[in-house]
Image: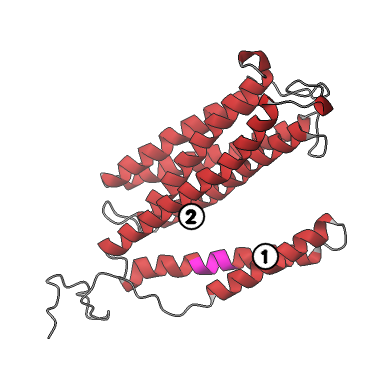
Amino acid sequence: MHDKPSEHINTDEHLPTTWHPYHLVEPSPWPMIAALATLVLAIGGVLFMHKIDKIVFFIGLGLLVFTFFGWWRDVIREGNTKGVHTVAVQRGLKIGMGLFIVSEVMFFAAFFWGYFHSALNPTEAIGGVWPPKNIVTLDPFHLPYLNTLLLLLSGTTITWAHHALLHGAQKDVVKGLALTVALGMIFTCVQGVEYHHATFALKDGIYPSSFYMATGFHGVHVLIGTIFLFVCLIRTKRGEFSSTHHVGFEAAAWYWHFVDVVWLFLFISIYWWGYHPTLMPLH
């Protein structure tokens, strides 16, 4: 006969009684739908880039967004109403988010590797210099500097919201999150203006390819993080977070701080150092 753990996980008479702290996930359609959506999106992307058809791409994109909405809705409901997000489950979710951020670090490391490989070893095809002779780089102390200030400020506002949540000051949490979301939206708009005024296009060589891949994917991460924080703002207003139960908020805050740090590396290496190539030897 097995001994039962001393901690009784669920005490609500409307919830099933369990004697272990783990969440046995119920069967869900979302993994299959997500796989199908990804396949349709990939095929649609190929068709889109070859100018054959656009509809398949947008169908896949819409299906993927629908999957995100439904899957995350179910996870939120599990934590709010089913009582399955115990301390052990929350710990697992935090570890999962941490590992995801590590994978994102590797993702951006590939872009930095490609950039510095070309910058430190410029070939004759681009004139033996970096940036290439035909490239007019962006002034780092214009719009890029403004975006740097915006993201640094957003890091302070999300930290303010986090500390307010730990102390139960919900009004300050709402203010901090609202300011962070607003700053994220302004950042995206400023980056759009920057791209509009850039004198080079993605197909103009190795520098534009490295520039747009690195900064563009970072911009996508900022947009995703802004949506993430906006959802947290809605959940905060609905009273779904407490000082001891706010894994979703912590995940969003970690993600946002990661986005901030990546931008600092982008600003220093691509905008600032790329604009002043004599600060480091090229050979």
Can you see residue 146?
no
Could you tell me which residue is drawn at 77 percent across and 27 percent down? 123
Instruction: Work out whether 80 lies above or below 237.
Output: below
Q: Nearer the viewer, residue 93 or 61?
A: 93
The kind of residue on which mark 1 rests is Gly
The Cα atoms of the two marked residues, 2 and 1, are separated by 19 Å
Q: Position of residue 106 (x, y in %)?
A: 53, 45
Can you see residue 59?
yes
Could you tell me which residue is drawn at 67 percent across and 23 percent down? 274
* Number of other residues with Cα within 10 Å of mark 2, as a class: few under 14, some 14 to 19, many 20 or more: some
Q: Position of residue 59 (x, y in %)?
A: 72, 67
Instruction: Work out whether 62 lies above or below 162.
Output: below
Q: What are the residue bounds of the magenta stretch?
A: 67-71
- Residue 231, numbered circle: 2
Q: Which secondary structure type mostly characterizes the magenta part of the structure? A: helix
Q: Helix, strand or loop at disc 1?
A: helix
Q: Position of residue 11 (x, y in %)?
A: 19, 75
Identify the residue position indicated by label 1 in the image.
Answer: 62
Quarter of the picture containing the C terminus is top right
Label total for image: 2
